[in-house]
Image (cartoon, helix red, strand yellow):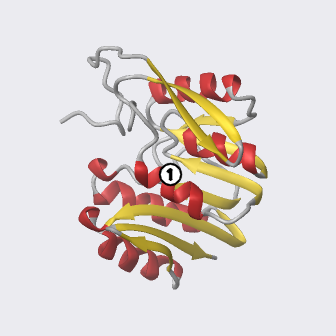
Amino acid sequence: MSHYFIEDASIKPDIKKIHYSFGGHAFIFTTNAGVFSKDHVDHATDILLNTIPPLAGDLLDLGCGYGCIGIVLAKANAINLTQADINQAALDLTKLNCKENGVASNIIKSDCFENIHGKFDTIILNPPIHAGKATTFKMYEGAFLHLNAGGKLYIVTLKKHGAESTQAKLLSIFGNCQPLYKKKGYFVFCCTI
């Protein structure tokens, strides 16, 4: 089954422009078939962006898709942005969207943390649920190893996508997992090193 956390050359193009507003900034994102939430900024991402407190330092937008989360946070905060995804088509869109929205980013093609070196003050993740728990749990474990002391991992997930097992896994890795948002089946978790 095809999903957005793989490269699938058989997907037919369906380029769109979508609009999003955050923190007094208006964003335009170019999306395409084969990336997550190509028709609009999904509700979970919107909740995540509106729940995260102000940020500083080095931020990793892991599984960045077309780049929305990192781009929005870079406009709203004084951060050094890195964005990573396994899907080259998504990364091409991220490069375009960074340019069109006036954001600088270090963009890396990586399967989870495979090509990511160094550590970050913040890692943000809207996990690729359809890639399976093995992949998402690998991301959580990698995040633990790639955060600076005092660094934070922020994750958004849904109850129907296994929020309870996600929280249990994060607790087992980090020793802490604070729910910052819990409403109508949506959860935002924060783990601190």
Q: Residue at x 75, y 54 (%)?
A: 58
Q: Residue furthest left?
A: 1
Other-residue count near label 1 (Cα within 10 Å), few / some / many at <14 / 14–19 / ≥20: some
State the image quarter where residue 27 is shown: top right
Q: Residue at x 29, y 60 (%)?
A: 133
Front position in the image: 75 or 115: 75
Q: Residue at x 30, y 48 (%)?
A: 131
Q: Residue at x 74, y 33 (%)?
A: 103
- In this rendering, position of residue 143 left or right of residue 171: right
Front position in the image: 162 or 135: 162
Q: Residue furthest front?
A: 24
State the image quarter where residue 55 is shown: bottom right
- In this rendering, position of residue 129 left or right of residue 71: left
Looking at the rendering, in which quadrant would you find the N terminus?
A: top left
Query: Residue 63, how many percent across, how many down?
Result: 48, 45
Q: Which residue is mark 1?
A: 46
77 lies above or below 37? below
Looking at the rendering, in which quadrant would you find the C terminus?
A: bottom right
Label 1, secondary structure: give it: helix
- In this rendering, position of residue 49 left or right of residue 5: right
User: What is the three-letter code of the residue carrying label 1?
Assistant: Asp
Front position in the image: 49 or 146: 49
